[in-house]
Amino acid sequence: NAGVTQTPKFRVLKTGQSMTLLCAQDMNHEYMYWYRQDPGMGLRLIHYSVGEGTTAKGEVPDGYNVSRLKKQNFLLGLESAAPSQTSVYFCASSYGLAGGGNEQFFGPGTRLTVL
Amino acid sequence: QQQVKQSPQSLIVQKGGISIINCAYENTAFDYFPWYQQFPGKGPALLIAIRPDVSEKKEGRFTISFNKSAKQFSLHIMDSQPGDSATYFCAASMKGTYKYIFGTGTRLKVLA
C-alpha cells in the first residue's frame, strides 16, 4: 500500500497563476483533509471532506477550492496564487472522525513557493 | 478556547537525556490527545496518544503524562537518541468532531 501520496512534491508559481494539488489514498478512508504548515503556526486545516462528493471549509479556506469526485482523491486548487500562500501543504486521510480517536495518515507534502 | 498551546518551540538535548515537551488546553470537552512526529521532508505520523481517563501512557521510550485538573499533557522521551530529532506536534479532539486542533510544534534536536 502506498498510503497517502501527493503530487507534485515541489512547485514554484508566479503571483496570479493557478494550480491544482492532487492527493490520493489507497486505504479506502472516508475522511480527507488539506492542511498548510507554516513556521511557528503548526498545522492549519484548509478544507476537509467527509466522503465522496462532499467538502467543507476548515480554519483557513480563503483563496483555496477543493473537490472530491472520487473517494480516493482529494484535489486542492489555487485559482490565483498569492505570496501568502507560500507554504508546505499536507494531505491527510482517516477512517473515521478525529473525535473518535481515529489516526490521520499524512502524505509527504508539497512545498509551494509563490513569487 | 479551541487552542492547544505547545512549548518549547525548540529543544536541544544531549544523547541519552530526557526530552520533555508540554501542551496545555482550555476546552474541557477535548477527550483525545495524540502526539505526532514529523521528520524533515516527511509528513507527520502518529507517535502515541492518550485519553483523559488515564494519567500516563508509555510506549517504549515515549511516555505521555496527563494532568486533567491542570489541563496539561506532556511528552517525555527517555534516553533520547539522534534519530529522535524531529518536530513534534501535540493535538486534541473532542467526540463527534472531524478535526484535530494541533499545537504549533516543537523542533527537537538530539546531539550525538
Image (cartoon, coloured by chain):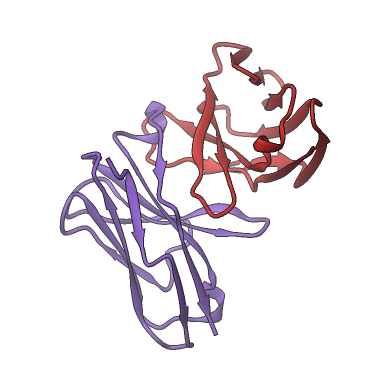
Chain colours: A purple, B red
Give B9 or B93, whichever is nearer the viewer: B9
Image point (54%, 55%), residue name: B41
Image point (38%, 30%), residue name: A102
Q: Is residue B85 left or right of residue A43?
A: right
Image point (35%, 77%), residue name: A19
Image point (69%, 18%), residue name: B69
Give A23 or A62, whichever is nearer the viewer: A23
Residue A88 x %, y %: 51, 63
Q: Is residue A39 left or right of residue A77?
A: right
Quadrant for residue A55, please give it: bottom left
Q: Residue furthest front?
A: B112
Looking at the image, how many numbered discs can be counted on the residues?
A: 0
Give B13 or A49, whichever is nearer the viewer: B13
Residue A11 x %, y %: 45, 75
- Relative to residue A37, is residue B23 depicted above or below? above
Quadrant for the N terminus of chain B in the image: top right
Residue B88 x %, y %: 63, 40
Give A102 or A23, whichever is nearer the viewer: A23
Quadrant for the C terminus of chain B in the image: top right
- Relative to residue B44, is residue A102 depicted above or below? above
Q: Is residue B57 left or right of residue B81?
A: left
Q: Is residue B19 left or right of residue A94?
A: right
